[in-house]
Image (spheres, rainbow, N blue to C red):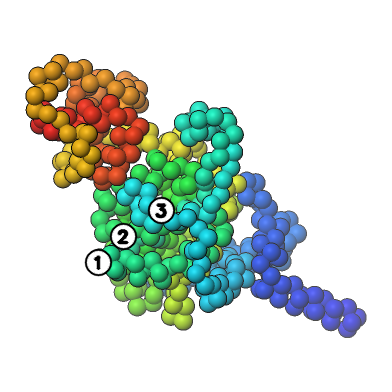
Amino acid sequence: MCGTIFGLLTLLILEGACFRLVENYASKRLSWSWGNYSQGSFHPILSKLPLDHFIAPPKAGQSEGSILEQYTQENTYSAKVMSFSLPLRDRYFEYLCNAADPLRKYHIRDLQSLRGVITPGLKRAAMLEDVRKGQAKRKGDLLEYAEGFFMVVTHAENNSDYEKQFAKLENSFAFLLENGFACVLVSSNNLEDLMGKISFLKASYPLLAENLIVYGKGEQASLVMEACFARPSFYRAILVENPTRAVPFPAESERTWFLAIQNAPLFEKVSTTKACLKWARKARQSEFLYPSRLGGLLRISKEAESLPIPSFAIAYALKCKSYFQVASMLYPSGKNSALDASQEVLGNVKTKTLDYPNFIFENEAVKIEKSFSKDFQTTNFECEMVTEYRKIHNGDPKVSKLSNRELVLIIGDTFASMGGGVLEEIAQKDPVFMRYYLSLRELNL
């Protein structure tokens, strides 16, 4: 009898050690406990055991005490439900300590207004659906893609500051690249600029940005929350560390995961902490098992972990990416699809002229001579962009009353507000529209 008990205790100790130290086993035990991504359900036998996988998440109606106490409850829950990630986090920390020149084998390039985008070098053959959507000329063409896209939002005072921040992130980016992510460091300090860059990325590079995850710290964390509030369908997850302002939860958020990391001294900002609590609890409201447990998490940061990107955030991003690679078909398509982001940009254009920003026409070919103005007045301004806009707003009486000339200005001003890089991309897709728009602006028509 004693031998049996000793043997069982030994097995339990070995199992616990494997779960803590062996990454593959930790992931498999989670999948055994919760089932597969698309049809997740608790294992009928394992759920009888006191495993961390089956801990119930805190709910607003069940939580008592101060804001700090509620956040502490959420932190305890996050630590237990993400306990499967401990071996991965160890591997991340070891990688940061040992990696040398980690980006040497990856391609770094600028994508219009997005500087220094690093891609993992993944390729796949185009399918008929890719040809239909204009992403390939023929079936079988090689297309560049990424399993996820990790964007870090920061504020850089100058080019030297940006380079220093990028250097600190190189090892973290390399770790993500080895796991199929594309990465970029974006310097932005206002919502319009950030939304313009993200809209351009989603519209122009959908195969790279399908699973977009955005991380911000401090003021940039609040900016990321505001961007998600404005367009929640763009993101698979947002990861925020020490946000400085309270941002309301978006009314429509069917799938965006949320992780907030805060330091204890910042709990004095009650409104911000309350907002994070609401975001986490709302993000867990899902009919599917995995997002109902992992969709919204709060974490109290440890001062000992002074990493460029916290290991908890890295593990969370990897789990989010792997989930949506499989389970994205569970969510509605249409306007929420990354592949339809370009139409979403058009579909949300306001039917009024926006303030036109200072836009520098670098291409001499687009300059319009004043002598052209008489003939230009008789042009009907028909082009692909205007035709597509009318199709999207078919049945809208306000749009039907607008002339093609007015629509060219409305659509063009909206794209211009997103930054010069967006207009340059539009010029490649519909040069006729771009000629009309720049001509109208040059002639002040």
Q: Disc 2 designates what residue?
A: 187
Q: Disc 3 designates what residue?
A: 109
Q: Amino acid at mark 2?
A: Ser
Q: Amino acid at mark 3?
A: Arg
Query: Can residue 130 be seen here?
Result: yes
Q: Could you tell me residue 423's position as x and y percent? A: 28, 39
Residues at marks 2 and 3, CA–CA distance in whole angstroms: 16 Å
Residues at marks 1 and 3, CA–CA distance in whole angstroms: 21 Å
Q: Is residue 382 above or below residue 87?
A: above
Q: Amino acid at mark 1?
A: Glu
Q: Could you tell me residue 350's position as x and y percent? A: 24, 34
Few, some or many C-alpha atoms within 10 Å of disc 1 (few <14, some 14-19, many ≥20)? few
Discs 1/3, front? 3
Residue 157: assigned label:
1
- Reading the chain from its start, which is encountered first: label 2 or label 1? 1
Q: Which residue sits at x=43%, y=36%?
A: 340
For the residue pair 371 and 191, the one nearer the viewer reads as: 371
- Reading the chain from its start, which is encountered first: label 1 or label 3? 3
- Reading the chain from its start, which is encountered first: label 2 or label 3? 3
Residues at marks 2 and 1, CA–CA distance in whole angstroms: 9 Å
Residue 90: assigned label:
none
Q: Where does the N terminus fall, quadrant-wise? A: bottom right
Few, some or many C-alpha atoms within 10 Å of disc 2 (few <14, some 14-19, many ≥20)? some
